[in-house]
Image: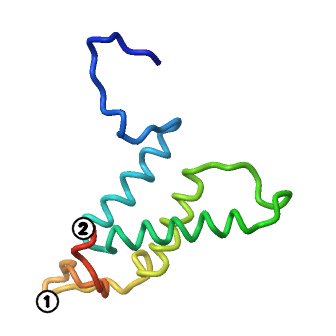
């Protein structure tokens, strides 16, 4: 899409072809912002995930889809930090309470 020359836009903003990509991006960012994992961990895991895809023989790895790697990375971090499987901590009134997710470098995000 070409904008009129008087229009401005953030060229560095992420671009999405599908709504699920926007949601995956937002979820990964929100989980980091809410201190479930440092952003640097997401970045390093994404790099490793893409590296695994690149190391797979070409006939076996399928087409390049950046946000497929993003979602795979998100799934790894959700599993690693037990975000869906950790026991729910509650107070005496049975209200959920926040707990640490074993962060080493929380300031990295």
Residue at (22% x, 78% y) in the render: 96
Residue at (31% x, 83% y) in the render: 101
Residue 109 position by quadrant: bottom left
**Residue ID for mark 1:** 92
Whole-percent x, y for residue 15 in the image? 44, 38
Does 13 sit above or below residue 87?
above
Task: Answer with mark 1 or mark 2, whichever residue precedes in sequence.
Answer: 2
Which disc, if any, is residue 34? 2
**In the picture provided, is 50 more to the left or to the right than 23?**
right
Whole-percent x, y for residue 45 in the image? 50, 71
Whole-percent x, y for residue 4 in the image? 34, 10
Q: Secondary structure at mark 2?
A: loop
Contact, mark 1 vs mark 2 (Cβ under 8 Å): no
**In the picture provided, is 13 more to the left or to the right than 100?**
right
Residue 105 position by quadrant: bottom left
Does 76 sit above or below residue 90?
above
Residue situated in front as seen by the camera: 16 or 82: 16
Residue situated in front as seen by the camera: 17 or 44: 44
**In the picture provided, is 10 more to the left or to the right than 22?**
left
Few, some or many C-alpha atoms within 10 Å of disc 2 (few <14, some 14-19, many ≥20)? few
């Amino acid at each position: 899409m070409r904008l009129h020359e008087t229009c401005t836009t953030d060229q560095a903003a992420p671009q999405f072809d599908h709504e699920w990509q926007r949601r995956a991006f937002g979820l990964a960012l929100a989980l980091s912002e809410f201190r479930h994992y440092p952003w640097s961990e997401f970045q390093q895991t994404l790099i490793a995930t893409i590296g695994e895809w690149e190391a797979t023989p070409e006939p076996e790895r399928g087409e390049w889809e950046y946000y497929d790697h993003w979602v795979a990375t998100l799934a790894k971090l959700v599993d690693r930090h037990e975000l869906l499987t950790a026991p729910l901590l509650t107070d005496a009134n049975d209200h959920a309470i926040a707990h640490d997710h074993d962060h080493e470098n929380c300031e990295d995000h």
